[in-house]
Image (spheres, grey):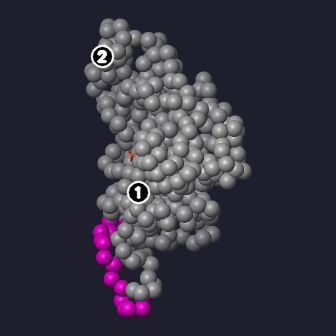
């Protein structure tokens, strides 16, 4: 589908790739962007073509020019063999887990995983006869000690959801592969632009396209990319579920793709600026941002990642709950709400203690997660400055 020759495609950098991937204006009357293709039925020209499924598109759930364009682009950007789409990030996680787990298996999930991932394992997978063990995200190569003869997959997420632990993905992947287990990674934070998952040993990489691929908080989408070893299994599982996203969301995702590198670099710059500002505040005990040298996982981040996105957390020095509420309730520029990766700044309070099982979450004060948007940094810090005044007045 890409108009570029294979030699050009092999040579170009990420920014050029984001602009050109999955796009061929010559095939659509010169118009630059792929329109949203709507459709269920696809007609076959004759009996033989129909009975032999002898054409590329056969039915709406199996793919459209829109899904092909985004899958092809994501495959290229991820250094994968194949990509399938899903209607949400969580659906993509479910699809990846269902690809690699079967009844009687044991699976290993990092204790720092996105919380709904745990719910899927503790309910659906449990009901299907799959046993889950949660492990300390800092386990590294010692993951081997937790593996059993029937361990079929290891799920990693780096940095961890909300708490930002880093994981040694290449070390975990090496041990898992030696025991024949599949390595699944939720790579939403870094995206393939800052962490090339398959180059680092990941078999199935998940991206919540809802976040940085969208970039505008106006769509929900998930993607799973696979290396050569898992490409066929992934597609076969996808075909069973037929969980396909709608054409308008794919259209918006393709639009987001073209500016993703710019937005991520700016999210990184803004994120570091705010993280450093917060680190200097007397009300802040600790900033959980892997690109700061003070972070426990900084060396791993530096070795394996080429950038950091605009999502990080802070731990405040102990204050009563009403002081945290006073900080948050008066904010004018920071919204309070879930999800992230959009153009606007957000903040939420969180507490992992209620669901962690392999590790204890006891950071020594209330915790907040920040998503930094594209606003002027001076305005954002002024908003928080007033918030900290309210916090002190209620402490
Ligand atoms: C948001 C998120 C998801 C789920 O994406 P949805 O599209 O909201 O379902 C998965 N993993 C991580 C790390 C996320 O932050």
Q: Closest to the observer: 340 or 146? A: 146
Q: Which mark identifies residue 86?
A: 1
Q: Position of residue 153 (x, y in %)?
A: 59, 49
**Whole-percent x, y for residue 197 in the image:** 59, 50
Is-magenta flag for residue 44?
A: yes
The answer to which of 105 and 53 lies nearer the viewer is 105
Judge from the rendering whether residue 294 lies leftward or rightward of residue 343; answer left or right. Answer: right
Label 2 beta carbon less than 8 Å to ligand 1: no
Ligand 1 shows up in which quadrant of the image? top left
Q: Is residue 95 above or below residue 120?
A: below
Q: Is residue 393 visible?
A: yes
Q: Residue furthest right?
A: 178
* Distance between the alpha carbons at the discs numbered 2 and 1: 39 Å
Q: Which residues are magenta?
A: 34-49
The residue to which callout 2 is attached is 326
- Residue 149 is marked as none
- The residue that appears at 30% across and 72% down in the rendered structure is 40
Question: With respect to residue 340, does 236 lie above or below?
Answer: below
Residue 208: say if magenta.
no
- Using the rendered view, name the quadrant where residue 14 is placed: bottom right
Mark sitting earlier along the chain (2/1): 1
Q: Secondary structure at mark 2?
A: helix
Mark 2 packing: few (<14 Cα in 10 Å), some, or many (20+)? some
């Amino acid at each position: 589908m890409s108009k570029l020759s294979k030699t050009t495609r092999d040579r170009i950098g990420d920014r050029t790739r984001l602009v050109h991937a999955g796009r061929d204006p010559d095939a659509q009357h010169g118009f630059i962007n792929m329109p949203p293709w709507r459709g269920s039925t696809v007609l076959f020209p004759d009996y033989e073509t129909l009975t032999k499924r002898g054409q590329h598109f056969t039915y709406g759930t199996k793919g459209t020019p829109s899904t092909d364009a985004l899958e092809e682009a994501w495959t290229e950007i991820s250094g994968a063999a194949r990509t399938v789409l899903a209607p949400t990030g969580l659906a993509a996680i479910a699809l990846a887990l269902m690809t690699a787990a079967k009844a009687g298996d044991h699976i290993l999930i990092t204790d720092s995983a996105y919380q709904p991932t745990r719910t899927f394992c503790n309910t659906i997978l449990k009901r299907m006869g799959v046993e889950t063990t949660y492990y300390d995200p800092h386990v590294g190569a010692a993951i081997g000690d937790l593996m059993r003869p029937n361990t079929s997959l290891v799920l990693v997420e780096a940095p961890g959801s909300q708490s930002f632990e880093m994981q040694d993905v290449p070390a975990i992947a090496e041990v898992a592969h030696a025991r024949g287990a599949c390595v699944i990674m939720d790579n939403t934070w870094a995206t393939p632009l800052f962490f090339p998952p398959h180059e680092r040993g990941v078999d199935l990489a998940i991206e919540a396209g809802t976040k940085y691929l969208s970039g505008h908080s106006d769509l929900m989408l998930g993607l799973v990319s696979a290396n050569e070893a898992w490409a066929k299994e992934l597609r076969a599982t996808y075909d069973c579920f037929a969980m396909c996203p709608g054409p308008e969301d794919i259209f918006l995702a393709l639009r987001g793709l073209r500016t993703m590198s710019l937005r991520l670099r700016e999210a990184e710059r803004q994120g570091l600026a705010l993280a450093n500002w917060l680190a200097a505040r007397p009300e802040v005990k600790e900033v959980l941002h892997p690109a700061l040298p003070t972070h426990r996982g900084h060396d791993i981040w530096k070795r394996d990642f080429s950038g950091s996105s605009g999502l990080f957390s802070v731990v405040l020095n102990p204050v009563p709950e009403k002081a945290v509420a006073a900080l948050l309730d008066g904010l004018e520029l920071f919204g309070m709400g879930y999800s992230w990766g959009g153009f606007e700044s957000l903040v939420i309070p969180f507490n992992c203690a209620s669901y962690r099982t392999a590790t204890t979450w006891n950071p020594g004060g209330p915790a907040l997660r920040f998503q930094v948007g594209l606003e002027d940094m001076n305005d954002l810090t002024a908003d928080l400055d007033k918030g900290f005044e309210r916090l002190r007045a209620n402490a």
